[in-house]
Image (cartoon, grey):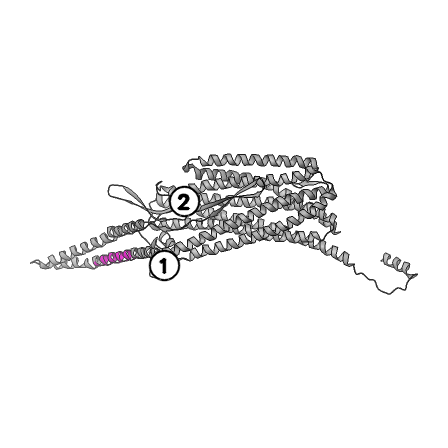
Amino acid sequence: MKKMILLVSMLAGVMTFSGCVDDKESASVTAVREAKAAQLSALAALSNAQAANQQALADTENALREAKVAYETAKAAYQQALADKANSEAQAAAAIQMAAAQNEIQRLANELEEMAIRHKIAMLDLQTQYEAALKKADDDSQALLGGLYMAYQTAATNLLNAQQEIAQQKIDLAKLQAGLVDSDEAKQIMINKENRKIASAEQTIAEWKAKLEVFEAQKAPEEAKAELVTEKAALSQLAQDKAKALEAADKAREEMNDARSDIYDQKYHGLAMDVTGSKYGNFIDEEGNPTGEAFGDFIYLQGCEENALGKPVEATVNTYWFKTTDDKGNTTYTAVMNRMIQKTVTKTETTAPGVESTNTYEAYPTYYYQLNAEGVKAYVAAIKANVTKNEGKALEAANKALAAQQKVVADLEKAEIKDEVAIEEAKSMLPGLQTNVNTAQAALDKANAQVAAIQAAFDTMAAEAANWTATVEAYNAASEAYCDAQFVYEKAEDAYGLQNAKVYALEAVVRGNVIVDGVNMTFDQAIESAEWQIANAINTISAAKQEIANIEIAEADQLKALAIERLEAEIAIAEAEIPALEKIVADTKAALDAATAAQAE
């Protein structure tokens, strides 16, 4: 208030006081204030998006943990049912629970893939918003905040990538432990992982070499600032290319998911689930609801998990099979239907001179379930034989018992001296024996109806085979297209990363210092750090190539156990590194927040 009075006093001698104060800020001041507010808002949105994604990853991990517990519980129940020689109903119920847990694990794997690409799209949009806000700042602010932002962005990206990699490793581990992966797939998982290490290390080498070239050139800040304009324009174009490639990959993923849904909608798929699952695992009533009565000696189709429970080596994990034992104790295993076999697609892309990135993505097979015609014929014949052996013989025995008792009655009635008491007593047994016949006949009718239902299911599947094949092949094409789109995105991302490294180094020259993992360095220290990073990446490539060689010569029966062991070890190591990555993110974010706040004052 004193300042206002003093100002009025000073102005009184030269002009007439108007009685009011013009408190409107100039247009330039408004523009600066709004630009800084936009920076703060965009930065907050970036931080919130990172936190939301980390929470989503944590939720996925919790859901995965629950699915693994459900699977292990169902597996234990199934093994106990086998050990106790429980009826087929108990075995089928436990097997169904195992399959449900397996499906949940696979669903989480698909969800993680979708989450990752959605988050990348969101982050690109938010980063573009922040960079746009930053461009409205003055040159000095751009240099300072740009460098700090890039350090934070790099740290946050490294943390996110590490967290997503851990989540993916846990999904792979759960799939291995849940019998969703056979030895060939286990081998491919391990090789793919090493190839990803090689690709990442090659990109790391290229980016650090780009930085090193700028650091060693020792250009004057003004010269670097002029060059920075051109390099930033190139970076902006590459950012647009990366965003477009990511959008295309997301569209391809949606098309692949739609094609996958078409598979699930196929009548063939539903019947394949029925003949290997709950609908035909138990008797059902006319409405198709389980009655609670088991098949007894009916043959239950066994799938992947039984490999660890006594299934013969020649019956591969990728088939549904049944076994029969003849009177001499000879056991025969017959494949009825092939199960889905996942395959992978690997492509090598040259992302920069001297940089070849080998990227691997999952594609899918030609058939999810493919009938073995001879196996189906043998399966139905075996079921019919069981019906004849059990329900048929039970009816035959009931009819014989009734006929024998009827003969007893007839003989008593023909006797010269009739024993009325004996006759009545013999007759009194006839209703019960007739009831036994009726019950046995009903059981045989029900069993025959169930066999007919199974036969009808297989007949319908055979009739639907052409549609099924076309639908799955369409899914294959969509899956391959998604892989191709992912490769295009990876290449665009690598190109962006390489250009971003140049911009990062030039901004450091303009600023006069280098920020590595949140730590300020001199240029001599930065050059030393870059040389160490390159040497370390070269060692990573060498070690990964040696690992691939070791995996290639490993015994097939050791591969799954080896994959599980390595994944568990790598998850433990990666999780131990997370706190350090989180600290770098916190430090770089704090430095950026402090500088942004200071600029806003």
Q: Which residue is mark 1?
A: 289
User: Around disc 2, counting alpha carbons within 10 Å, would you say few (fewer than 14), some (14 to 19), or many (20 or more)?
Assistant: some
Q: Verify whether residue 27 appears in magenta.
A: no
Q: Verify whether residue 439 appears in magenta.
A: yes
Which numbered disc flags the more N-terminal residue, 2 or 1? Answer: 2
Q: Position of residue 259 (x, y in %)?
A: 46, 55
Contact flag, marks 2 and 1 (Cβ < 8 Å): no
Q: Position of residue 597 (x, y in %)?
A: 72, 50
Looking at the image, which is closer to me, 546 or 18?
546
User: On the rendered image, what quadrant is the N terminus found in?
Assistant: bottom right
Q: CA distance from mark 2 to mark 1?
A: 26 Å
The residue lying at 31 percent from left, 49 percent from top is 375
The kind of residue tagged 2 is Ala
Q: Is residue 543 left or right of residue 340?
A: right
Q: Which residue is mark 2?
A: 76
Describe the element under mark 1 as helix, strand or loop: loop
The magenta span reads 434-449
